[in-house]
Amino acid sequence: MKWLIPLATLLVLSACIDEGDWVDAFDLPIGFGARPFFAGYLKLNSLQSIYYVYTPSEENPSKDPLVVFLSPFPGCSGLHSWLYFNGEFVFTKNSDNFRHNPHNWNRQANVLYLEGPAGTGFSKGANANITDQSTT
C-alpha cells in the first residue's frame, strides 16, 4: 500500500509526456485566461481507466512538492474539489460560470487529482455500479 501513491504519481507523470493530454486553458470557455494543465486517462487494465488532472505549480514545477489528491468520499469524483474548492478556476456558486480562485493549491505545489475507483466520475470501468463497498 505504501507504494501506491509513488507508483500512481510516476504513471501519471509519464503519461503526461503525451501531448494529447495537454489542455490549453486559454481555449476553455471560462471567460478569463488560466494556466495550461494535463488531463486524461490512466489505463489500469483492458476494462478500466481512471481519469486524472495534473496542474503544474505556478512557482517552480521542477522543485515544488507534489500533492496527490484522492477522492474524499467513496465513489465520489476527486475532481469535485478541483472544480469547486482548490483549483485555479472554480465554479461560481449558484451559477454555471467560473471564477479565478486566488487560493488555488497549485500556486506553490504540483497537484495531481485522481478519480477512483474506476467507474467513478469520468473514469471508465467494467463495474458501473459503484457503492461504498467498492472502496473497502
Image (cartoon, rainbow, N blue to C red):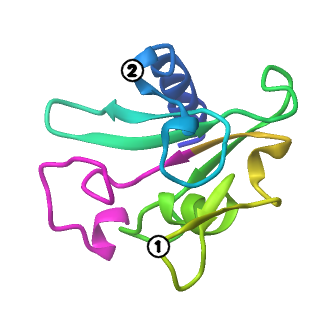
Would you say residue 118 sits in the magenta stretch? yes
Give the image quarter of residue 120: bottom left
What crowding class fits label 2: few (fewer than 14 Cα within 10 Å), some (14-19), or many (20 or more)? few
* Horizontal side of residue 48 vs 9, given as left or right: left
Query: Residue 81's spot in the image, x, y percent?
Result: 58, 64
Query: Residue 65's spot in the image, x, y percent?
Result: 81, 35
Say which quadrant the C terminus sits in: bottom left
Closest to the observer, 25 or 127: 25
Residue at far front of view: 31
* Horizontal side of residue 44 vs 77, given as left or right: left
Q: Give, as a three-letter code, the residue at label 1.
A: Asp
Query: Real-space Cα distance between discs 2 and 1?
Result: 27 Å
Give the image quarter of residue 55: top right
Residue at left 43%, top 15%? 18
Q: Earlier in the sequence, mark 2 or mark 1?
A: 2
Residue at left 59%, top 81%? 93
Would you say residue 23 sits in the magenta stretch? no
Q: Give, as a three-letter code, the residue at label 2.
A: Gly
What crowding class fits label 1: few (fewer than 14 Cα within 10 Å), some (14-19), or many (20 or more)? few
Marks 2 & 1, CB-CB < 8 Å contact:
no
For numbered disc 1, what is the local secondary structure?
Answer: loop
Of the residues tagged 2 and 1, which is closer to the observer?
1
Residue at left 54%, top 54%? 30
Closest to the observer, 10 or 24: 24
Using the image, determine if residue 74 lies above or below residue 124: below
Mark number, residue 20: 2
Using the image, determine if residue 6 lies above or below residue 70: above
Q: Which residues are magenta?
A: 113-136
Query: Residue 99's spot in the image, x, y percent?
Result: 66, 64
For numbered disc 2, what is the local secondary structure?
Answer: helix
Residue at left 69%, top 60%? 86
Please name the residue that numbered disc 1 is placed on: 96
